[in-house]
Amino acid sequence: MLRSVLLGAPILAGCVLAGPVSAQDADPGAIVNALVAAGGNQPKVRASGAKGVCVKGSFTPTAEAADLSKAPHFAKAVPLTARFSMGGSNPKVSDKAKPITRGFAMRLSDPAGDMVFVVISAPVFSTRTPQQLLEFATVRAPGPDGKPDAERIKAFGAANPETTRQAAWLNARPVPASFAGVDYWGVHAYTLTNAKGDATVAKLRWVAAAGQLGLSDDEVKAKPDSFYADELKERLSQGPARFDLVAVLAEAGDPTNDPTVAWPEENRKTVKLGTVAITAVEPDAICDAGTFDPVADLPEGVAGPADDPMFAIRSPAYAVSLSRRTN
Ligand code: HEM
């Protein structure tokens, strides 16, 4: 029943599709430099997600997942390596910081090829184009006093109102008490294609089984600046931390080319694709040796949006960052 409802009418029509956008509309190296500068130019750091915890676990798909996508990772349980992180390139950022996204990068392994998602604790990204990301990061560079120019940031936000949506969303919610106590979103519109060739456009959401665990203002004050890593170890000693991977299906008019716009999630058709179980913390070296490339490492059956200029450029930018921090 579910199958015929979902696949009878592949949800493609009505999505706002523009022509493919070049990955090169801003230089990936310039963006990486600007992201690293915004975090205070720390040596050998990721351009974003500099502070984080490497973990391992597994992904177990639902029976419905294979109805939507022919990726082998949706046909059987697979191991995964993942990394939770704090947004930005400052490895000393406080775990209490707001409005900063928490990140979740994951590599689902299969002999036929990996499937990588790199997602954040907000349904929207901060910028619409790579050029806008370059400018967004540039205005946040600290001045001689070690602080960014608040007036310049304010003026940029006023001129680029879509870049303020993510911070507004995060500011309206508490600081997460745990990397495993908050939902994560893929932000981009993915196209899932099944073995019959039916395509479904969806945004992906990782729903925390623990629920949304937020800290009160008093709890935030009582916490040290680094508590996520210890909290996660303690949590995992009691059992796996689980997330349901849910596809939120597109409806007519949903933009696929703008990750600063959230699709309305009320009354949307959703399909649970499976469950991520995080089981243990791994040495940093396991995650630091490579990068989680969310563009290059996608199997047949899962594709990123060709019309979202923020998608394709992630691949060269992550490669530049990897090369900078490992050489
Ligand atoms: C123009 C678009 C983007 C650019 C240029 C960019 C750039 C980067 C770079 C250079 C890194 C460091 C990679 C490494 O050293 O391994 C990074 C990491 C990260 N990015 Fe992006 N990013 C973009 C979009 C996004 C989006 C849309 C999301 C979320 C949906 C995101 C989430 C993350 C996360 C969570 C990490 C940390 C990965 C890890 O733990 O290894 N980024 N980004």
Image (cartoon, helix red, strand yellow):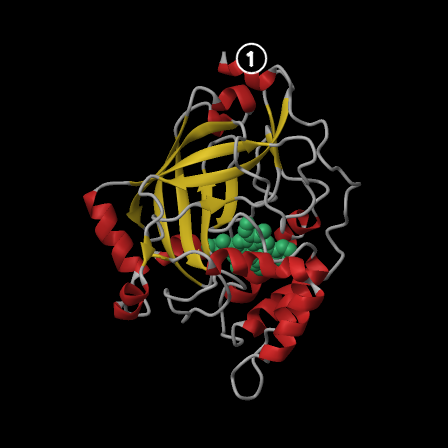
Residue that badge 1 annotates: 4
Mark 1 sits near ligand 1, with its Cβ under 8 Å away: no
Give the vertical position of 165 relative to 248 (above or below): below
| Residue 152: image location, x then y, percent | 65, 77
| Disc 1 residue crowd, few under 14, some 14–19, many 20+, Cα 10 Å | few
Residue extending furthest left? Answer: 238
| Residue 42: image location, x then y, percent | 49, 74
Corner quadrant of residue 60: top left
In this rendered view, identify the residue nearer to me: 247 or 280.
247
Dot 1 amino acid type: Ser
Ligand 1 quarter of the rendering = bottom right
| Residue 47: image location, x then y, percent | 54, 64
In this rendered view, identify the residue nearer to me: 2 or 104.
2
| Residue 203: image location, x then y, percent | 56, 37
- The answer to whether any part of residue 313 appears in the image is yes
* Label 1: element kind: helix
In this rendered view, identify the residue nearer to me: 281 or 272.
272
Residue pictured at 48% horizontal, 24% vertical: 65
Corner quadrant of residue 11: top right
Query: Going by the image, does 101 lie left or right of 132?
Result: left
Query: Going by the image, does 276 lie left or right of 38?
Result: left
